[in-house]
């Protein structure tokens, strides 16, 4: 498919999701390129983003990510919910071992997602994951039932190259960390720049997390 055809398909999925689940639908905004493209697609359809955007605050974001989320939220008129799990924060701050910090960070994300979906009464949550990102996501569907809601994945069929082509074509703002060598963004504790041009997109992410991604997704991760 051409980029135009892929864009049209994504918009069809977004429209169907809103038709089925509005007003009880949210959209995940991480401050990364994929969720920003999802926001832009939604905004281009409706003139605004007509649902709340969920930002998972894991207390360990790059300053650039926080600034980008705040700036984009203001410029695009987003209603952003800061999803948090403060119960694990004391353990996270007390941890001196990097492995332990990463494990706690993963659980904070999962708990924050579950809590926010329940608190908001969402029947569906739109997420900007893609088939080519990770083997654990390669078999996903556009509408993927979970225990208490449906995950909607409008840009599954986009590749990393498609995402950047869309950003350039539509002058979409993006996180400045990408200009510093990052290709996939997360917490500072598990995200590094990628220097090898032939490395996979998520080569800069925590290796243990990548290895157990399937299990994490079963628990509620994206």
Image (cartoon, rainbow, N blue to C red):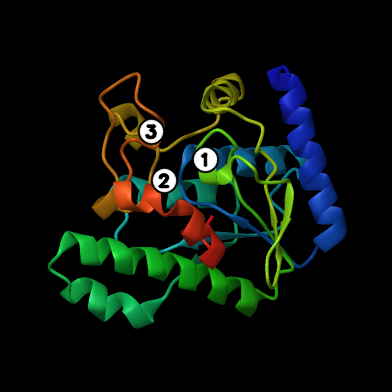
Q: Distance of mark 1 from mark 3, alpha carbons?
A: 17 Å
Label 2, secondary structure: give it. Answer: helix
- Residue 153: x, y in percent? 67, 47
Q: Nearer the viewer, residue 35 or 80?
A: 35
Q: Residues within 10 Å of mark 1 (few under 14, many from 20)?
A: few
Vertical relation: 192 (above or below) 95 = above
Residue corresponding to mark 1: 135
Label 1, secondary structure: give it. Answer: helix
Q: Nearer the viewer, residue 107 or 72?
A: 107
Residue corresponding to mark 2: 68
Q: Which mark is first along the chain, 2 or 3?
A: 2
Q: Nearer the viewer, residue 174 or 90?
A: 90
Residue corresponding to mark 3: 183
- Residue 163: x, y in percent? 56, 28
- Residue 142: x, y in percent? 73, 46
> In the image, is 190 to the left or to the right of 5?
left
Q: In this rendering, which labeled residue sits more in front, label 3 or label 2?
A: 3
Contact (CB < 8 A) between labels 1 and 3?
no
Instruction: Name the residue: 39% across, 37% down.
Output: 202
């Amino acid at each position: 498919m051409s980029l135009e055809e892929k864009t049209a398909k994504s918009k069809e999925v977004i429209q169907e999701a809103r038709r089925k689940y509005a007003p009880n639908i949210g959209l995940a905004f991480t401050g990364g390129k994929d969720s920003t493209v999802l926001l832009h697609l939604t905004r281009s359809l409706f003139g605004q983003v007509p649902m709340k955007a969920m930002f998972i605050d894991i207390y360990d974001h790059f300053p650039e990510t926080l600034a980008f989320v705040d700036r984009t939220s203001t410029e695009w008129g987003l209603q952003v919910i800061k999803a948090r799990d403060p119960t694990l924060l004391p353990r996270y701050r007390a941890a001196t071992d990097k492995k332990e910090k990463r494990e706690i960070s993963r659980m904070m994300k999962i708990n924050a997602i579950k809590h926010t979906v329940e608190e908001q009464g969402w029947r569906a949550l739109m997420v900007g994951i893609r088939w080519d990102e990770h083997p654990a996501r390669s078999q996903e569907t556009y509408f993927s039932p979970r225990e208490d809601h449906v995950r909607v994945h409008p840009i599954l069929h986009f590749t990393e190259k498609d995402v950047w082509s869309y950003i350039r074509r539509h002058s979409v703002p993006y996180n400045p960390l990408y200009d510093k060598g990052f290709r996939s963004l997360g917490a500072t504790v598990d995200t590094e720049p990628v220097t090898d041009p032939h490395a996979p997109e998520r080569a800069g992410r925590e290796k243990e997390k990548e290895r157990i991604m399937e299990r994490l997704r079963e628990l509620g991760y994206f």
